[in-house]
């Protein structure tokens, strides 16, 4: 009985201690929308992706032309020539698939360009969040734009504008009076499961103070 009472007391203090912790949230989508440098980076990446896609489509079109020519002439070809042409088409197709991987694959050209353009901006935003969280003693900072389902938020805990002000001198953010913030709408219970992250997908969660290595 004494053990049970002790467990209940410890549980109570743990529970109340959890709610005694200070927390805040940010909207990274709103933050990034108000950083022109990020928008410029996204435009560059979109243009580059379109350029790469056109290159790949042209290479596949070339393979298609090779195959149609082969089909038209295959009847008159000796077997050794036919086999050689088939091998050429197969090799060309493998070459284009490898080229596509180099452009769009993990650690490919587009990925590396995204790292070059976007990662420094993300680092500055994270450092600003970490500095604000440390100075104001927040135990947790959640991302409202992430995959975490938030049923209700109080705007007084939103530090997104603080983050924009913090990185403004470096990244040249949009002036506070010109920023447009989307109104947050609480989710009804029947909509909570809609649009949630699929199992196995990676998504941002709460940023904990001191969590970064």
Image: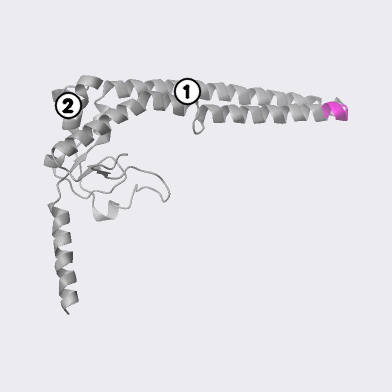
Name the quadrant of the C terminus: top left
Q: Give the range drawn in magenta.
A: 78-82
Q: Name the residue under label 1.
A: 50
SS at mark 2? helix
Among all residues in the image, which is located at the extreme bottom? Answer: 1
Q: Position of residue 183 (x, y in %)?
A: 19, 38
- 195 with respect to 6 (left or right): right
Q: Which of marks 2 and 1 is nearer the N terminus?
A: 1
Name the quadrant of the N terminus: bottom left
SS at mark 1? helix
Residue 81 sits inside the magenta stretch: yes
Q: Are marks 2 and 1 in contact (CB under 8 Å)?
A: no
Residue shown at the point (37%, 23%) measured from the top left: 117
Q: In this view, does 190 lie above or below 27?
A: below
Q: Name the residue under label 2.
A: 165
Residue shown at the point (17%, 60%) measured from the top left: 14
In the rendered image, is residue 191 in sight? yes
In the rendered image, is residue 172 in sight? no
Q: Which mark is residue 86?
A: none
Magenta highlight: main SS: helix
Give the CA distance from mark 2 to mark 1: 34 Å
């Amino acid at each position: 009985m004494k053990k049970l009472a002790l467990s209940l007391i410890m549980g109570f203090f743990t529970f109340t201690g959890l709610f005694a912790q200070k927390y805040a949230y940010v909207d990274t989508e709103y933050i990034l929308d108000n950083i022109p440098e990020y928008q410029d980076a996204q435009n560059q990446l979109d243009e580059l992706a379109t350029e790469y896609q056109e290159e790949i489509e042209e290479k596949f079109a070339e393979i298609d032309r090779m195959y149609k020519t082969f089909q038209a002439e295959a009847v008159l070809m000796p077997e050794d020539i036919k086999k050689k042409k088939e091998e050429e088409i197969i090799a060309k197709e493998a070459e284009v698939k490898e080229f596509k991987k180099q452009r769009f694959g993990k650690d490919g050209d587009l990925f590396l360009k995204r790292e070059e353009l976007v990662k420094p901006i993300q680092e500055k935003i994270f450092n600003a969040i970490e500095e604000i969280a440390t100075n104001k003693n927040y135990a947790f900072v959640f991302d409202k734009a992430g995959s975490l389902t938030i049923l209700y938020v109080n705007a007084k805990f939103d530090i997104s504008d603080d983050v924009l002000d913090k990185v403004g001198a470096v990244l040249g953010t949009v002036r506070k009076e010109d920023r447009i913030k989307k109104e947050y709408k609480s989710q009804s219970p029947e909509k909570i499961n809609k649009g949630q992250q699929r199992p196995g997908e990676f998504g941002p969660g709460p940023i904990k103070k001191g969590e970064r290595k």
